[in-house]
Image (spheres, grey):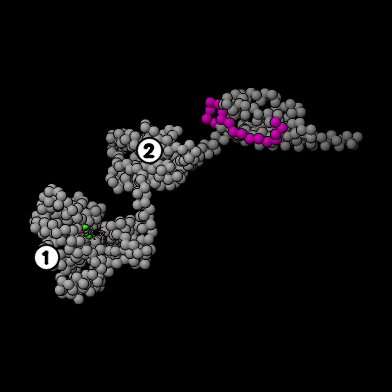
């Protein structure tokens, strides 16, 4: 009897505990945002738990077979996969998860199935869990999007473009096909960005991107690299779609101004560099690089220019890179030497002055022309130490000559825009002049118009200070830029150096003569001294003298010489 009592008590206790457990499980499931189905195969019971209605409203599953009622919730093309998952026991698997889009709704569910088997490998229990993964999926999609696309324009980003272009090149290699890579850069974009603000700048970038996107196809990839730079690849260009037709077609569209959201309008133009696989390069990155190098060449030629790859462009470029690298070392090791080219008073053997011209002896003994390395030095900043060397070395040498020889002649020094821009330019020049105790009026700075165009106000202020101090200013390469004589009137200039191109055309072109004569007449009226540069022959020399040009510089009279050469000349001239 006691035994029976004990068993009844035990059963009651177990029942109570099970009810408590079930209550707990139910509570856990019901407060979950997931939906569950529990299936007991032996008893063939189904229980729907959790937030069931949020997933399958008004759908009741009473037995295993009724799981098929859920098919209608997923898209038709996923039903087969969904069925396999819901009846996982048919494939004797234990756990499996998959994600489905709900039919007609923008909702994604993850379905996870868990089956338990007995010793004979028959299923005993199954739990199916449904979770809403819409948010997670959206975030994932966004990440995927960001990995492939540029958010501003919706075009491929650089990385993805490179990957796709690599697939193109692989395919072209196998099929002996051609790929054109087009590198785009908008003209004067910084003016839009600086002048109208970056929000407008972004809008321009976006609109140009939309315009390019119109050419997208299976054979045309388009990418926005950054700022105002885009790249396009055409697989097997043909007579309809090729670099030239696209260039023309975009330009046709750009004839109409681009209308911006603030109501303003801008006219856009762009330069384009074109490089082709396999001619320009065989690998993807080199191909893009080539197109970019060619684009730089196009930029040099002006606005709205298209330029095609050819071998000399590349070797020029590589040469410049090599020079740039050597230049960095040269600045350090000071492999530079100053040369000086005499300037004479026209029609006489009287020295007017010397122009300091830098020479660079490369370590393999080759001379590299300043016309080549100065522009590179201006770009990479090396012009600052080089310019400082030019100023100090030429003034040092000149101060020695002034003491040694009794001759009144000037020293002209070329100064580039970057040097003028340095905040301590005026100060450090005056410091050197004082250090070597030379007369400021013996020193002449040569400037080119480009210096004035870039930073007119700042440079003008500095020139006025220097001129006040007594230093002379000469305008170099006159006639090659925008200069009109009336524009010069406001500038503190003493001397006009007439560019060699004028002198070159004297013999062949009567118009040049007329222009030259009127330049000289007008400069006289304005009070400028004139120097003709690059005079190479007796006929040029005598013509220049006859039309009243004050001074002459050129190979005909003297080439640039080193210090010893100038000293020999000064001796020879009897000073
Ligand atoms: P630039 O200032 O116009 O200098 C005149 C150039 O014409 C010099 O070339 C000179 O050697 C050359 N030349 C003079 N007479 C004749 C001639 O009759 N026929 C020919 N064919 N050429 C003649 P260089 O020394 O090669 O300098 C080239 C340019 O490099 C200079 O043009 C100047 O812009 C720049 N440069 C040279 N030295 C310096 C420097 O120390 N500092 C800066 N910033 N630039 C320099
Ligand atoms: Ca010069
Ligand atoms: Ca010149």
> Quadrant of the image for the C terminus?
bottom left
Q: Between 574 and 212, which is closer to the camera in this rendering?
A: 574
Q: Give the labeled residue for mark 2.
A: 209
The residue positioned 9% from the left and 54% from the top of the image is 521
Asked if residue 102 lies in the magenta stretch, the reply is: yes
Residue 3 visible in the snapshot: yes
Q: Residue at 70% across / 34% down in the picture? A: 93
How many numbered callouts? 2
Numbered label attached to residue 348: 1
Q: Quadrant of residue 428?
A: bottom left
| Mark 2 vs mark 1, CA separation in Å | 64 Å
Quadrant assignment, res 573: bottom left
Image point (25%, 68%), residue name: 562
Question: Is 476 or 515 nearer to us in this picture?
Answer: 515
Check if mark 2's residue and mark 1's residue have beta carbons within 8 Å. no
Q: Do we see residue 457 in this rendering?
A: no
Residue 403 location in percent, x, y? 20, 76
Outermost residue to the bottom: 404
Report crowding for label 1: few under 14, some 14 to 19, many 20 or more residues within 10 A (C-alpha): few
Q: What SS does tag 1 mark?
A: loop
Span of residues in magenta = 91-107
Q: Is residue 18 magenta?
A: no
Picture quadrant where residue 255 is located: top left
Mark 2 neighbour density, 10 Å: few (under 14) some (14–19) many (20 or more): many
Q: Which quadrant of the figure contains the N terminus?
A: top right
450 or 114, nearer to the observer: 450
Left/right placement of residue 156 relative to residue 417 reads right
């Amino acid at each position: 009897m006691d035994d029976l009592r004990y068993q009844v008590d035990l059963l009651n206790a177990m029942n109570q505990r099970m009810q408590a457990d079930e209550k707990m499980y139910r509570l856990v499931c019901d407060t979950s945002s997931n939906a569950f189905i529990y299936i007991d195969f032996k008893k063939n019971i189904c229980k729907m738990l959790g937030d069931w209605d949020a997933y399958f409203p008004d759908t009741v599953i009473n037995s295993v077979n009724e799981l098929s009622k859920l098919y209608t919730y997923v898209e038709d093309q996923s039903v087969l996969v969904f069925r396999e998952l819901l009846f996982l026991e048919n494939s004797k698997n234990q756990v499996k998860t998959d994600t489905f889009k709900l039919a007609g709704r923008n909702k994604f569910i993850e379905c996870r199935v868990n089956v338990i088997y007995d010793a004979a490998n028959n299923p005993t229990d199954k739990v199916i869990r449904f979770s809403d993964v819409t948010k997670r999926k959206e975030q994932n999609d966004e990440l995927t999007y960001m990995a492939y696309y540029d958010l501003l324009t919706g075009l491929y980003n650089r990385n993805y473009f490179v990957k796709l272009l690599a697939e193109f090149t692989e395919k072209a290699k196998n099929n002996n096909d051609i790929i054109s890579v087009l590198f785009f850069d908008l003209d004067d974009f910084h003016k839009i960005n600086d002048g109208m603000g970056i929000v407008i700048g972004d809008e321009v970038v976006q609109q140009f991107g939309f315009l390019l996107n119109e050419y997208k196809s299976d054979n045309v990839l388009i990418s926005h690299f950054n700022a105002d730079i885009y790249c396009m690849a055409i697989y097997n260009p043909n007579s309809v779609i090729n670099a030239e037709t696209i260039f023309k077609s975009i330009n046709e569209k750009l004839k109409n101004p681009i209308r911006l959201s603030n109501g303003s309008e801008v006219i856009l133009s762009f330069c384009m560099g074109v490089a082709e696989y396999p001619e320009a390069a065989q690998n993807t990155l080199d191909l893009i690089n080539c197109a970019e190098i060619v684009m730089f060449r196009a930029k040099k030629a002006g606005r709205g220019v298209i330029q095609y790859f050819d071998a000399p462009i590349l070797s020029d470029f590589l040469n410049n890179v090599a020079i740039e690298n050597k230049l960095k070392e040269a600045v350090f090791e000071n492999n530079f030497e100053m040369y000086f080219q005499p300037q004479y008073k026209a029609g006489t053997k009287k020295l007017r002055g010397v122009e300091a011209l830098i020479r660079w002896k490369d370590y393999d003994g080759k001379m590299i022309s300043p016309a080549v390395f100065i522009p590179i030095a201006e770009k990479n900043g090396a012009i600052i130490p080089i310019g400082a060397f030019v100023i100090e070395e030429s003034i040092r040498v000149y101060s020695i000559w002034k003491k040694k020889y009794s001759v009144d002649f000037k020293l002209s020094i070329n100064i580039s825009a970057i040097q003028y821009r340095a905040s301590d330019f005026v100060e450090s020049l005056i410091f050197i002049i004082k250090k070597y105790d030379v007369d400021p009026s013996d020193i002449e700075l040569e400037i080119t118009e480009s210096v004035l165009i870039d930073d007119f106000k700042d440079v003008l202020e500095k020139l006025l200070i220097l001129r006040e101090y007594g230093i002379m200013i000469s305008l170099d390469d006159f006639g090659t830029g925008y200069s009109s004589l009336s524009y010069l009137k406001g500038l503190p200039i003493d001397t006009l150096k007439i560019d060699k191109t004028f002198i070159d055309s004297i013999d062949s072109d009567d118009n040049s003569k007329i222009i030259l004569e009127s330049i000289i007449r007008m400069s006289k009226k304005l009070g400028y001294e004139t120097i003709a540069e690059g005079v190479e022959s007796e006929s040029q020399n005598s013509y220049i003298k006859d039309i009243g040009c004050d001074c002459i510089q050129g190979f005909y009279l003297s080439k640039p010489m080193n210090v010893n050469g100038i000293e020999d000349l000064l001796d020879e001239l009897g000073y």
